[in-house]
Structures are given as structure tokens and as C-alpha cells.
Amino acid sequence: MFFKSKYCIALVALLCCLSVNAHEIYVSTSGNDLNSGTKDQPVATLATALRKVRNLRRLHKIAPNEPVEIILKAGVYQLYEPILIRSEDSGTPGSPTIIRSESESNAVLSSGVELSNWKPNTAQVPGIPESISRELWVTDMPKTGGRTLDFRQLWVDGEKAKRATNLGEEELDRILSVDNENEILWIPTPKWDFSNVEDLEFVIHQWWAIANLRVKSLEVKGDRTAVRFHQPESKIEFEHPWPAPFIDDKKEYNGNSAFYFMGAAELLDQPGEWYVDYKASKLYYYPKSKQQINSSKLVVPSLETLVEIKGNSSVKVSNVYFKNISFQHSTWMRPSEKGHVPLQAGWSLVDAYKLQQPGTEDKASLENQAWVERQPAAVEVSNAEDIKFERCEFKHMAATGLDYIVGVSNSKIIGNVFNDIGGTAIQAGFFGSPDFEAHLPYVPTDEREVVHHLDIENNYIEDATNEDWGCVGISIGVAHDINISHNEVFDVNYSGICVGWSWTKTISIAKNNRIYANRIHRFAKQMYDVGGIYTLSAQPNTVISENAIYDLEKAPYAHMPDHHQYIYFDEGSSYILAENNWTERDKFFSNSPGPGNEWKNNGPKVSKEIKKKAGLQPEFQNIKF
């Protein structure tokens, strides 16, 4: 009996050891989707690999404790539609589905379309001086699926080129006045005689946001010009009260709202800029001095979202992990199609107006109403649990990088790099919607839709918010038990880390959030009303501790350039503790906060050891290189 028991134990141990070997399916850019998926016979697409895993699980051919690895060989996998991961693609705690690169050379999932057939331009381009026309490269607008592809970004040899603009070439002009009734902005008459106003986009600095407005007409009246805009953004721009165009009537601040133009031929005057002639369906690029027409790689994005992990409230996606994957080249077309007038943190207003009689049931002093729309993310996660992104790269994104939207829990974002992000790098939680007013406290009847218990750790975020200046490094709306620790956020135009939404002291589902040991520096480059760490609304038992926050920039066009803080408790912030945070100066602020906040030992006298230990932990220091 002893020997039989001993044999059984040994057999079970052997089986357990064997079961830790993962079931592997290989993917290669040189593969074939008719192949079996072995290392020697890889499939060609991630979608096919997911289908194979789905069938294996359906037929119970995967052991309960056998991980499944979809292994992508090095290369660029061009996507023509988003990869969709459904509930049926779920793993289990003992048998997760792991999608990873074969080696440290990351496999790239990209919607980038490489442009070819560039030629030296020989024709005079309307609106562009002959001397510059002769320097341009030209190609036909690309097509995908038989249709001309529109886009707002162009990358040349991995660097984002500038769409034709006057931004960065001279000090920006300021608006002169606002005519809300007739929906007109009056500006100094531009020095350019724009030949095709329909190409023109007007970007205006508005307190803590910028708005993108498609120009409908310019009416010159001597040294003043009336600018009108297309709908729907025109109505929103002139009806929404916050953040509106700023007029410094009393000359007490830093001047009226600044603005710049982009998109028109006349603005193409600097190497590194590009312009689309939509009537001729031609793309022009003004090369930099060392760029060669035959060796440079020019790429435009074709998809707003690359990967969707999408379950439902009843059956969630679970136990899916991404490791060492690079996500690249996403677009965002709303500004070109509908304009973009944000409320805050990049959230597009779809309707907004001032209340003639202030006050709502939740807030007696509230004077405005706002309904918002989420920017698309390169990777979107909805109704899921135990989802992990580890040591991945998010690069060349037009809007948000990674977004945990609704019903996501017990998931991790660990050790990833976010670089060249047009909007927010990492976003999660509820922020209102087109059918839920943004200032209402969020207490859903169905708790399955709440985002909670996320770990956002050891991520390196650099050069986010580089198109929509009002976006954020890490942005958490209404959510609970979110751990944001040991991240480094560097080089952003607005706030580094924002937690909270709704502008209310009323208790919602937000609570137990932790912002610990992050390193935030070189922030507030362009915007006003900023915090290195910024909060809104009641969040019981939320703690902000041992962060290092420094290199607070002075925004050149903010109407109050000194209204920026290292830690900022904005409207309704309640029951939050800020303790032992190292900052280079004592600069903290509370604006209409609620009860229960505590400030303990923050500022330059805090131990330098806290500054030293903040940011990426030693085992993640190498990810930024």
C-alpha cells in the first residue's frame, strides 16, 4: 500500500511538472494562416492564432493548468481592422492566454501604411512659394480598401512630422473678441491669404484645454478678421461656459486666448512639415536636410484602435496577458470630422451649455451642463478581468494609448513604455458619456460596470499629450482601489496624474485609490490649472504619498501662468491624504474642496530618500532604453 501511494504521488508530481509547459502557437509575418501554427509552420496573423486557441479550449484540448502562448516572431504585423478578443478567448487562472514576442525584439502590431512612389515635386503648388515647391516630395494619397485614406499624422523615419502650421515658428497671436450670439471669433487679420479656407483648422488655447475648430469662413475687416466655424463644433464652442475662450478685459493676466492655424498650403514653410491637397489627392512633404527620398520611411496611421478586449457584463474576458508586444501607429479623426471642444482631460463635448438658473439636485451652485465623448485608444479593454500588459510598448498614438473603459477589474499594467502619445497615455474608469451628464455622481445600479482593483506600476511615460495638450499622463475617472505606483511621467503639457471626476463632494463609488512613489517631472508645459498630481471629487481613503514632483514648467500662453501646482485638490476633492511627497517648492492648492482632506509633511524639506526611491524600481530601470 505504501509503494502504491508513493507511486501515485510521484505520478501526480510528474504530471504537474509536465503540465507547466505551455501550449504554443507561432505567428510570423512570413507565415500562412493555413499552417498548423507550430514553430516551423507559423500562421500569419494574430486573429488566426486566437481562433485556434478558441477552438482548442472549446474542444477541451487544453489542460486546466496548461498556459497557452501565442508567440509572435519579430516583425511588423500590419492591421487592417482591430484585433478583437472576445469572452470566448478567455483563459483561466491556471491556463491563461499569453500573447508575447518571441524575443526581446518586440513584434509590432501597427495600423501604419507605408507611403511609396515619392517623387521630387516639379509643379507649382497653389499657395506655396515656388522656391519651396521645388524642395517638396510628392505622392498620391494612399488608399485602403479601395478608398482614399485620410489621416492627421505622418511619421518620417520614426519621428512625427508636423502638419503644416505656424505653431513653433513665432509667438502666437491672441484672439481679439468673442461674439457668442453670432458664433464668431475676431482675430488680428492673418498675414496669409488662404486660397482654400476648407483646408484650415483653428486651434485655440482655452484655460486647461485646447479646441480644434474647422474653419468655415474668414471675413477680413481691415486689421480684424471674423472667423466662423463648421457645425457641430461651432455651436458647442460658443455655448459651453467652461473652459471658454479667455478675454483679459482688465489686462490683469497674460492676455487673451492664443491660437494657431494648421492644415493649409500657405503654412507649409518649414522642413519637416507636410500638407494634403485634397482636391488633387496629393500629399506633399518638405524634407529635412539629411532625409533622402529613396531611403526614408514615411508612415501614416489607418485605424483608431488596434486591439479591443471586449466582453459583456454577464460574460467577461478573463486571463489574457500581453508581454513584450509593441503597439504602434493609431489615428484619431474626430477633429477633422466634427471638431474637438473638450471639457477637460481630452474629453470631447457633444453638448454643453450654461444654465440660466444655476443649480442641480446634487449641486446648488452648478452653472453648466456637459455631456462628453471618449477619445479612442490604441488598445481598449471593456468588461474584463485579470488582463495584463507587461513590458509592452505604446508608440506613435494619435489619441489615448491604453484605456480600461468599463467593467474592468483585478488587472495590471506593469513595466510598459509609452512614447509619442497624442493624448493620454493610460486611462481608466468612468468620466460621463453622451447619455450621462459629466457632473453627476456615479453610483451605477449594476456594479459589474465599475472599474476597480487595477495595478498601474513601473510604467515609463514620455512625450504624451503632444497633440491634445489638455490630456494627461495617467488619467483615472471614477473608480476604486486603483494602485498607481512607481511610474515615471515626463514631458507632458498638462497634469501628470489625475484621479477623480464629477466635480462633486457627494460620495460615489470612488474610494481607496493609492498614488504612491511616482516620479513626475517636466509637466505643465502648455496649460493652466495644472497639478503634478490632480484630484477631483470625494474619494474616501485615497492616499497620495512619497511621490517626487519637480520641473514644474511655466506655460507661455496660459492666462495665469503661475496657476499650477505640485499637488492640486480641485473641486469637491474630499477624504484624501497627501503625505511625505517631495517637491522642489511649497506649491500646493485646494479649490472648493470638500471635507476630510489632510496635508502632512509635503514639500522640499521631505527626505531626499523619497525622491531617490520614487519612479521606476530597479528591475524596471532598463525599460526606458
Image (tube, rainbow, N blue to C red):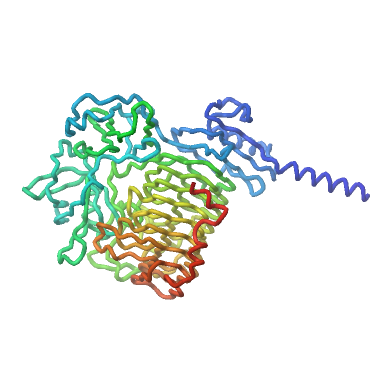
Compared to residue 580, the image places residue 32 above or below, namely above
Report whether 116 appears left or right of 542: left
Q: Locate residue 103: give its quadrant.
A: top right
Compared to residue 574, the image places residue 42 above or below, namely above
Q: Position of residue 189 (x, y in %)?
A: 12, 47
Whether residue 504 is visible here, answered yes or no, is no
Q: Locate residue 352: give its quadrant.
A: bottom left
Report whether 214 appears left or right of 427: left
Q: Position of residue 546 (x, y in %)?
A: 49, 66
Report whether 245 appears left or right of 507: left
Q: In this view of the protein, which residue sits in the foreground, 254 or 307?
A: 254
Q: Residue at x 62, y 39 (%)?
A: 69
Q: Residue at x 28, y 28 (%)?
A: 138
Q: In this view of the protein, which residue sits in the foreground, 199 or 502?
A: 199
Q: Residue at x 32, y 67 (%)?
A: 360
Compared to residue 343, the image places residue 399 above or below, namely above
Q: Position of residue 370 (x, y in %)?
A: 31, 58
Q: Residue at x 87, y 45 (%)?
A: 7
Which residue appears farthest toward the right when viewing the image?
Answer: 1
Whether residue 293 is visible here, answered yes or no, is yes
